[in-house]
Image (cartoon, grey):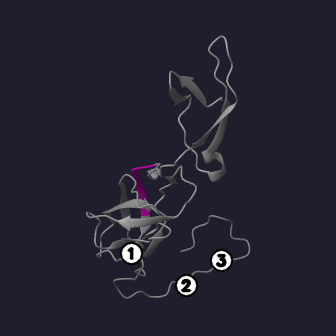
Amino acid sequence: MESYYMKSNNLKTRVALNYEREKQRFAKLYFTVNDGYCKSDLYTLDVEIVDVPEPPVLTHEEMFIEVYEGEINTPSNVFVLDEDLDKDFTFSELGGTDDEFDIDPVTGNIIGSVTLKKNTKYKDFTVKMEVTDKHGLSSSKYTAKVRVYDANTNRPYFNHQTQPLRLSALDCTPPGAQLG
């Protein structure tokens, strides 16, 4: 009776019931009725709690992620909380996501391929997603601001013809001495 009490003809709960494990969803209550003069026989009442699935909850609703251009497969850094025991989630892309990116439906990773224009230091993109559990319940929306930096894949070059530089030092040349 630690979770229940009687009020008039109604059985009330003392705490909010949230039973995810099936073994905890059933209770058998034993009671007798006493009017002050006579005591009844022992009665039992079987109580079954029907669990209602809760939607998943995201720990962050907005993140800032920095990556370099090229093939991108980066964690979205979203953490999903769900009171239900089944942790089977599907991540999906929402409208408003830039075309360069997709969402991996299993891991939630942000994937895509971005090549920046020459002399572009970085470019910002928006990725929006939500998480759905196996009951079809959806989470709040998640937005990631993704900043893609130039990976500087161009090799350096000289813009004029150069001659080789020949310098020599002796065994007794002191460290830091100017050579030429």
Q: Quarter-wise, where is residue 131 in the image?
A: bottom left
Residue 5 at x, y = what percent?
A: 58, 26
Of callouts 3 and 1, the N-terminal one: 1
Instruction: Kindly indicate the quadrant of the structure image that contains residue 48.
Output: top right
**Discs 2/1, front:** 1
Magenta span covers which residues? 60-66
Tell me, yes or no, whether the two marked residues, 2 and 1, touch with CB atoms within 8 Å: no
Check residue 73 for magenta coloring: no
Name the residue type under label 2. Arg
Q: SS for tag 2?
A: loop
Q: Is residue 28 left or right of residue 109?
A: right
Three-letter residue code for mark 3: Ala
Residue placed furthest toward the top: 36
Q: Residue at x 44, y 70 (%)?
A: 105
On screen, residue 106 above or below 12 = below
Label the magenta part by its dominant secondary structure: strand
Q: Residue at x 67, y 65 (%)?
A: 175
Near mark 3 (Cα within 10 A), the count class, few <14, some 14-19 or many ≥20, is few
- Is residue 62 inside the magenta stretch? yes
Instruction: State the image coordinates of residue 116 (x, y, percent, origin top left).
Output: 32, 74
Q: CA distance from mark 2 to mark 3?
A: 10 Å
Residue under label 2, please give it.
Answer: 166
Given this view, does label 3 or label 1 mark the residue nearer the observer? 1
* Amino acid at the residue labelled 1: Gly
Q: Is residue 55 above or below residue 96?
A: above
Q: Residue at x 62, y 80 (%)?
A: 168
Label 1 belongs to which residue?
Answer: 112
Which circle marks residue 174 in the picture?
none
| Residue located beneath label 3 in the image | 169
Q: What secondary structure is found at the residue carrying circle 3? A: loop
Label 1 crowding class (10 Å Cα cut-off): few <14, some 14-19, many 20+?
some
